[in-house]
Image (cartoon, rainbow, N blue to C red):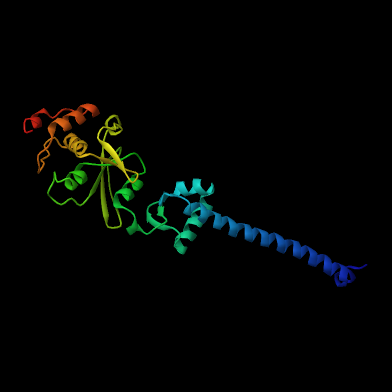
Amino acid sequence: MSKNEKLKSPAYFFEILSVCKVHLVILYCTYMYSIKKRSDYVAVLMRQKEQVFHTQDLAVLWGISNKNNLHTVIKRYCKKGILHRIYKGMYSTVPLNEIHPWKLGAKALHDYCYISAETILQKEGFINAAVRDITFVSNKSRVFCIGSNFYRSRKLQERFLFNPAGITEENSVKIATPERAIADMLYFNPRANFDRPVDWEKVKRIQQAIGYPLTKDRYVHS
């Protein structure tokens, strides 16, 4: 059979049709798999108690090792409103205004840190002046802003930083007690003034537990 005769034969036509069907089935299965995979990503995301994620958190959560694929998925979900970009390399499953500012700051620092110093002292009435920045203590010195929230991280030596004396936790954010906040403040600024009476005995115990230098000249005011 000549080539032209073969091309015109019904058998050849059905052979080509069969091959096309196979390719269509493969394409359809690939498409459905990708749809299922994307829905699996959403399901995994929505099962998490956590609302804020770094890019690497999402990579681990979804098991995506290819950076280009990861950023493609993140970009798509941001467009659909499944994810919200809230800071450099940081995303959430809820809008920015639904996340507590303290949690946002802790997530942005992405390392061990706790709320202390001016923020706690203002909250507890030891500082009457308005305080704009939310103050963290961590292993880095940093000033940054997320939305309308301003943050400041005071750098503390790790031998002091990880001491748990006077540290509590609320909604997964570590927070200093007033006495720890005063001890921290005096470490950063020994001349700091306070607008209400201080229980210096408690502060002294915190300083001793952490290993801070004792501020003996302050205790006479107790």
At which x and y percent is residue 203? 17, 32
At which x and y percent is residue 12? 85, 67
In which quadrant of the rendered view does residue 149 lie? bottom left
Q: Is residue 196 left or right of residue 65?
A: left
Q: What residue sits 15% from the left and 28% below the top?
A: 214
Q: Is residue 17 left or right of residue 134?
A: right
In which quadrant of the rendered view does residue 170 lie? top left
Q: Is residue 29 left or right of residue 183?
A: right
Q: What residue sits 50% from the left and 45% below the top?
A: 60
Q: What residue sits 41% from the left and 58% below the top?
A: 84
Q: Is residue 103 left or right of residue 196?
A: right
Is residue 55 or residue 217 the one in the foreground? 217
Name the residue at the right extreme: 1
Q: Quadrant of the N terminus?
A: bottom right
At which x and y percent is residue 156? 26, 35
Q: Quadrant of the C terminus?
A: top left
Name the residue at the bottom extreme: 8
Count the numbered circles shown.
0
Relative height, residue 69 to residue 183 (above, below): below
At which x and y percent is residue 146? 31, 54
Relative height, residue 44 to residue 159 (above, below): below
Q: What residue sits 17% from the left and 32% below the top?
A: 202
